Every structure is written in C-alpha cells, then in structure tokens.
Image: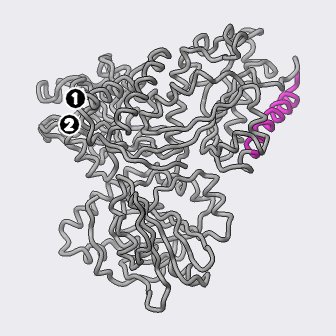
C-alpha cells in the first residue's frame, strides 16, 4: 500500500527538535481551521528542513483520492497535518465534486490512472436523489432505500474491478431542518427516518473493503449547526462548515492510519492524578480521590472503565510512573474502588528515572515500536520531555479536569481500527503468556531445552476468508520481522488468493502457555522455474523459536510440488527490519546482488542436498490435529530486537 521510509531525530538540530516538539504538542490539542492551515505551512517547512519526520518510526507514503458530492478543495492541507501525526506522507488526488460518479465509473478516468491505495468518498444529504413519497408504505420506503444503496454498491463493485483500493465512505449526517418537527422520528417516509435507515443499510451491506466513517455521529458531537454551512453550499457547493473540518479530517486521518497499520497498539499511563486523584506517596491509598461520592473520584472511575474497555478490545496497557514500585502498586492491590488491576497491564515500570528512558524500556519489553505507544500524563513538563526526546510516541494534551480525559483519548482516534479480529480481543493474554515464557527461558539451562519445553504446535494453510482480516492486519502492521515491508490492501490480498500462480500461507502457533494466534504470513509467486517470495513476515511474539524453519519447510515442499528449480527472495531494508538482513543467508540462500539502498536478492537452488530444517515444532494437520514433530535445531538463538 505504500513504501516505508526512514524516520528519526538523529541528526536534527536543536531548533528543529524544538520546532517538531511544538508541532506535536499543537497537533494533539484541539485546533481550529485557521490553526490547521498555519500548521500545514509549518509542516512543509519542517519536512523541507529536516527531510524526514522525527521519531523512531517508519514513515508510510501512500496515495489517496478525495472524492465527494461537494467542494473538497479546503480539505487536503488539514488532512496532511493530521496524517503527519501518524507518520504518513500522502500523494493526493482531488476529484471534481461535480464528477465523482464519472471518476468512479469510467475505466479510463484520471482517478484510476492515479492508482490510489485508498479512495475517500465524502457524501452528504445533497447526494441522495431517491426519496420516498409522502405517506409511502413500509414496503415502498424499503424499496427506495434498497435502490439508493444499490447505487453505492455499483460504485464499490466498479472500484473493486478496476483497482485494489480500499474505500472510506461517510454515512449521511442528518440535516438540521425537519418539516415535520419531532414527529419525523415516528414517520418512516420522513427525511430523518429515511436517512437513518440508509445509514443502517450502509453499515450492513458494505463489503469488507469499504469502511464507514460515521459522519452522523461526528455531526452530533460537534453540533449540526456547526457541521453544515448552507449559505456556502449555495455559493461554492461547500456544504461542510469550516469549524467541522478539524473534526472530519482528524477522523479521516485515524481511519487511514488504521488501514495502513499505523494505529497505536499500547496505552501507557502515568498514575498520580492520571488514574486517580492525589499523590499516593503523600496521601496514602486511603487518601486518594477515587470512587463514588466525589466528583473527581467518579471521573477517574469512569476513565478507568473506558481504559478497561480499550484493553478488552485489544489495546495493550502499561504503566510508566515516577514512584517507588511498592507504593505505585498499592492502589491496585488494596483500593476497593480500583477498576483496573495489575493483571490488566502488560508492563509496569515505576522508578525515578526520566520517563523518556522508561518509555523506551517499555517498548523494548513489549517488543513494539515507539510509534505504537500513546502516553498519558497529567504533568505538562513530562509531556514536553517525552515529545522532545521520544518524538515517535503520541502524547495527547490533557486538560486539568479528569472528567474530560475520556473525551481526549476518544476524539484522538489513536486506537482506530479497520477490522476487529479474534487475535485483537485476546491480545493482552498473549503478552501475559509471553511473560511466563520469558520466566521459563530464564531458568532453562540452554535454548534448545527451553524450546523443547514450550511444546509448540503450528497449523497452517492457504489464505482464506476466515483469516483474511488478520492476514491483512499483519501485512500492514508488521515492521521488524518483515523482509520487504510491502503493504497490501484487502483487495490486493484477495487477488493473490484467487491467482493459482501464487502460493499463500498463514501460520498459527500455540504452546504450553497458550495460543499465540495467527503469527506469520508468506506470499510467493511462481515465475518460470522459480518460486519467488514476495512477502515473508512473522509476529515479534514468536521470534527465534524456529517458526522461520517451519515456514521454510512448507515453502520447500511447495516449490518441489510445483517442480521449480529454485526459490528466490528479496530483503528491502528499513530502519526497523535490520534484524532480517541476513535472514536468507541463515537459511542457506546465496546472495545474487546488493543494490545501493541496501536491498539484496537471494536464491536457493533446490538440489537434493537441500533438506527440511530441524526445529522443535509439531505440525498440526488441522486446527485440532497435530502431526509430525521436527528435530532439534541446534542453530536456534535469540536476537535483540
């Protein structure tokens, strides 16, 4: 879906770092449209001077088409500002609002020549031309709604036939005016009732490559009188009010980031005056403001409930506190009103080191990128320090009133998702199980004995609809154990599923401590006498446990089944995947070429002496059955990621 570029603060002058820190503090606060335009100018200057984003984060460059039934000329600059927050650079195609259907339906349009990765379709009530008649029956209203939905379905199908772009489409924000007043809500043929029906049908019938931006919800939050600008609509065909632009573009940027695998993974929390009121080291557990009967205490309770909901849908939680460890843990262990418990956190760091250093430790402990972290701290000095020295981490501006903490986190869209897989819902359990594995590794006499004690089982199979969401998610999120970091849309993955020249493989792994879920993806294409690896990636949860050897054996079997004489692959370096630099060499491939940017190409001739690689993994013939067991791999070792 886009190329990964390098990012980082290395080499930046002090004044550039301060400028970026100021930019990041502003972007995480509420902005007006004029402020966004000013920031867009600043962004261009920062990128020109530094020639990169700051922070330990891979930058994604992608191509996005903006289409809609109203004038969108005011949206690109604000959208670019909010995409910068997600380390996304964008090439934009701006369609003519009068011709958005022609752009989508014409195979030779400039839109398809642009080859977008994502198409954004912004629609409002002016785009609806099929309306039920007054006093229409239920069946008649349903028929009109079905025909209106079919118009959109035809557009989606045309896009799918022409390119592999994902689509973000808004539902319809309800207009302010209601000829029937409050009675509209009870009248099925009224505009209010009908548009709500359309929005419901849109959500139900959108295929997996179409993602719905909830404009009805956003307009309700902002206020419809601010969302719509009817006078400007009649003069310039711009129906969206300028005060609505920050809300819309921030939400769009979050959805784009989710599709690109750039959503944040981990929420890191300060404790005192962030999770509870008061400083526990001063007032003790009994003196904290937390619980019913106190306005501040109730606000913190509701904030903890919201955080718990994030955890239950797959967000990793961590603590970063300047405190004595035993004092920091005391409220979790003994305060009766605490919603969050110690087991909810996958990392807990409490000491007197600076928080920038501790956040780096947390990322290393969890084996996630710094750009995966969102750090919430009530102290503005701590926020400023982290932005300056670990710019890849997202640091929202927090108001003084804890009653607004939930809103800040929610409106930020940092944890936006394009899909929700089974792995997301049990992610925290993966990290808790990983902690047990690390404890087991610490007491094992050697690596081989540790790997054998895990009792690992892998099941695998070709790409299928059941696993498609997780496969696309891994392709667009995995950075470290990823040989090419090639991003693919769901449509592009679907094309490979249907093409017999491709060999596709997903791998699931479980061991004595639990199920790791779907943790590896491979895509290879048969070309003449060669099976060429296009994508090979693995989750950092299972690094150096022999999974790569298990996959190599599957690849070897497939190459021989197809009668190819060799297997070839490419390593494309990024700042995050240097661990993969000698991956092919370690598997016995020979280097063919090294390019100026560090890209290397490799080949393995399938002579008779190329054999299965030994490992400590049992192969499951299906999700339920286990098959053959590999031998000990004496070359297994751990790598510092």
Q: Position of residue 471 (x, y in %)?
A: 53, 57
In the image, is residue 583 above or below residue 267?
A: below
Label 2 sits on a secondary structure element that is helix
Q: Of callouts 1 and 2, which one flags the residue occurring earlier in the amino acid sequence?
A: 2
Q: Is residue 33 visible?
A: yes
Q: Which residues are magenta?
A: 136-158
Image vertical order of residue 100 relative to residue 599, above or below = above
| Disc 1 from disc 2: Cα separation | 7 Å
Outermost residue to the front: 596
Is residue 151 inside the magenta stretch? yes
Q: Which residue is mark 1?
A: 382
- 285 left or right of 238 in image: left
Q: Looking at the image, which residue is at 80% across and 38% down?
A: 150
Specify whether 207 is left or right of 622: right
Taking the image as shown, residue 16 lies to the left or right of residue 115, namely left
Q: Is residue 609 left or right of residue 74?
A: left
- Residue 275 appears in view: no
Identify the residue position indicated by label 2 in the image: 355
Residue 388: horizontal and vertical position, in percent? 25, 32
Of 41 and 235, nearer the camera is 41
């Amino acid at each position: 879906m886009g190329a990964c570029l390098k990012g980082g603060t290395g080499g930046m002058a002090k004044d550039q770092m301060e400028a970026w820190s100021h930019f990041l503090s502003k972007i995480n606060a509420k902005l007006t449209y004029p402020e966004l335009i000013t920031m867009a100018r600043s962004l261009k200057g920062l990128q020109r001077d530094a020639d990169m984003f700051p922070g330990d984060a891979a930058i994604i460059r992608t191509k996005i088409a903006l289409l809609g039934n109203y004038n969108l000329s005011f949206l690109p600059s604000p959208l670019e500002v909010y995409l910068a927050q997600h380390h996304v650079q964008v090439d934009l195609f701006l369609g003519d609002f009068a011709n958005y259907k022609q752009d989508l339906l014409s195979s030779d349009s400039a839109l398809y020549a642009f080859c977008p990765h994502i198409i954004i379709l912004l629609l409002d009530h002016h785009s609806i031309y099929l309306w039920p008649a007054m006093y229409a029956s239920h069946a008649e209203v349903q028929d009109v709604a079905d025909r209106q939905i079919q118009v959109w379905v035809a557009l989606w199908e045309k896009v799918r036939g022409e390119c592999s772009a994902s689509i973000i489409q808004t539902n319809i924000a309800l207009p302010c005016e209601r000829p029937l007043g409050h009675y509209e809500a009870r009248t099925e043929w009224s505009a209010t009732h009908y548009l709500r029906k359309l929005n419901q049908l849109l959500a139900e019938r959108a295929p997996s490559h179409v993602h719905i931006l909830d404009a009805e919800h956003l307009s309700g939050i902002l206020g419809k009188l601010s969302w719509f600008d009817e006078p400007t609509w009649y003069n310039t065909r711009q129906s969206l009010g300028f005060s609505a632009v920050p809300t819309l573009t921030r939400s769009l940027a979050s959805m784009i980031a989710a599709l690109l695998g750039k959503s944040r993974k981990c929420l890191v929390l300060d404790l005192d005056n962030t999770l509870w009121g008061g400083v526990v080291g001063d007032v003790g557990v009994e003196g904290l403001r937390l619980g019913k009967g106190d306005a501040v205490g109730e606000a913190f309770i509701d904030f903890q409930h919201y955080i718990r909901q994030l955890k239950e849908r797959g967000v990793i939680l961590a603590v970063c506190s300047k405190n004595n460890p035993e004092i920091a843990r005391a409220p979790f262990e003994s305060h009766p009103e605490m919603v969050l418990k110690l087991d909810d956190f996958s990392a807990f760091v409490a000491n007197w080191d600076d928080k920038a250093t501790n956040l780096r430790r947390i990322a290393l402990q969890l084996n996630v990128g710094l750009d995966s972290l969102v750090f919430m701290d009530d102290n503005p000095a701590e926020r400023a320090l982290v932005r300056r020295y670990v710019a890849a981490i997202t640091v929202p501006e927090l108001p003084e009133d804890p009653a607004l903490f939930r809103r800040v986190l929610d409106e930020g869209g940092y944890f936006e998702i394009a899909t929700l897989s089974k792995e997301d819902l049990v992610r925290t359990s993966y990290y808790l199980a990983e902690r047990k594995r690390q404890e087991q590794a610490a007491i094992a006499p050697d690596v081989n004995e540790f790997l054998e004690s895990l009792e690992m089982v892998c099941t695998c199979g070709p790409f299928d609809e059941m696993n498609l969401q997780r496969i696309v998610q891994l392709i667009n999120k995995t950075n470290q154990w990823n040989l090419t970091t090639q991003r693919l849309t769901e449509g592009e993955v679907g094309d490979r599923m249907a093409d017999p020249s491709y060999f596709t493989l997903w791998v699931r792994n479980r061991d004595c401590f639990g199920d790791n879920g779907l943790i590896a993806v491979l895509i290879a294409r048969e070309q003449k006498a060669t099976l060429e690896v296009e994508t090979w990636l693995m989750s950092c949860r299972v690094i150096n446990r022999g999974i790569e050897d298990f996959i190599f054996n599957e690849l070897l079997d497939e190459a021989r089944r197809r009668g190819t004489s060799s297997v070839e692959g490419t390593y494309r370096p990024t700042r995050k995947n240097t661990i993969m630099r000698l991956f092919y060499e370690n598997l016995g491939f020979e280097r063919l070429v090294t390019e100026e940017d560090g890209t290397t190409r490799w080949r393995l001739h399938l002579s008779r002496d190329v054999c299965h690689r030994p490992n400590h993994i049992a192969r499951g013939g299906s999700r339920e059955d286990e098959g053959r067991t590999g031998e000990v791999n004496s070359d297994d070792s751990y790598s510092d990621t």
